[in-house]
Amino acid sequence: MRILILFSLLLLATCAKQKVHIKSAKDYKKEILTIKKYAAKHHYNQDVAFMIDYSLHSGLNRFFVMDLKKNKIIKKGLVCHGDGKGKNNPMFATVFSNTNESHCSSLGFSLVSERVYSKWGKHYKYWLNGLEKTNSNMRKRVVVLHAWSGVPDQSVYPKVIGTSFGCPTVSINFLDSLDTILKTNKKVLLYAIAPSR
């Protein structure tokens, strides 16, 4: 009986630690530096960039707008990850792919490209051009930045949000705020990462 109680306490402590880790703020200085170096080397926008941290729980804000001049996050929102045809659960993305019909999110640098009509959200989306081997098929896969009314405006953690077919899908209001940025900033990078939890 004593062993069972000790095991239960240990399990509770482990879960509590994991919860704290999941909810804790992250320092993205290293990632901002990586974005800045890539943008400078390849002549992309060096004022602002977008980043998604897929290692975070889907109910947490994990889509970030980075001010590359001030080295800080200036906006954040929720974003869906690909369902991977059942390989990913709604909480965390663990499987990523560049393969057509995989329904997975892709990692690496992509360029936010032209604004076109969408049947989702407020009827516009942005094409994404993958710039790396891990995401070079984004356009062929029709992986785009778009909105969906099912994505909330605020963090819902520990609840989860819906999944997508691989598109980074945000709330309508958040896409509107990104749209404002994209109207005055060209050649903006989107950097999708999934560091280990």
Image (tube, grey):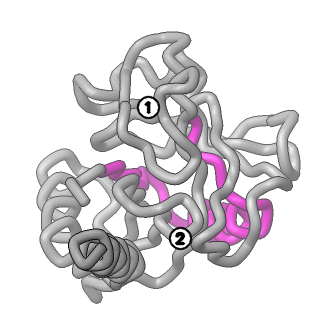
Amino acid at dot 1: Asn
| Residue for point 34% across, 60% down | 45
The spot of residue 18 in percent (x, y) is 32, 72
Which one is in front, 158 or 2? 2
Q: Residue furthest front?
A: 1
Tell me, yes or no, whether the highlighted magenta stretch contains residue 28. Answer: no
Tell me if I can see residue 18 in this picture: no
Q: Secondary structure at mark 1?
A: strand
Quadrant location of the N terminus in the rendered image: bottom left
Left or right of residue 121: residue 151: left
Question: Does 162 sit above or below residue 29?
Answer: above
In the displayed structure image, the side of residue 180 where residue 56 appears, left or right: left
In the displayed structure, 194 sits above or below 46; it is above
Neighbour class for label 2 at 10 Å: few (<14), some, many (≥20)?
many
Residue wearing tag 2: 60
Quadrant location of the C terminus? Answer: bottom left
The span shown in magenta is 167-193
Q: Residue at x 28, y 41 (%)?
A: 108
Q: Position of residue 151 (x, y in %)?
A: 75, 58
Is residue 168 one of those drawn in magenta? yes
SS at mark 2 in the image: loop
Task: Name the quadrant containing residue 35.
Answer: bottom left
Rate crowding at label 1 as few (under 14), some (14 to 19) or many (20 or more) other CA atoms within 10 Å. Answer: many
Residue at which label 1 appears: 129
Tell me if I can see residue 152 in this picture.
Answer: yes
> Which-is-in-front pick, marks 1 and 2?
2
Which residue is found at the position 47% from the left and 55% from the top? 186
In percent of width and height, residue 162 lies at 69, 48
Amino acid type of the residue that numbered disc 2 sits on in the rendered structure: Leu
* Residue at left offset 37%, top offset 20%: 98
How far, Cα to Cα, is label 1 from label 2?
26 Å
Q: Locate residue 125 relative to residue 186 in the image: left or right.
A: right
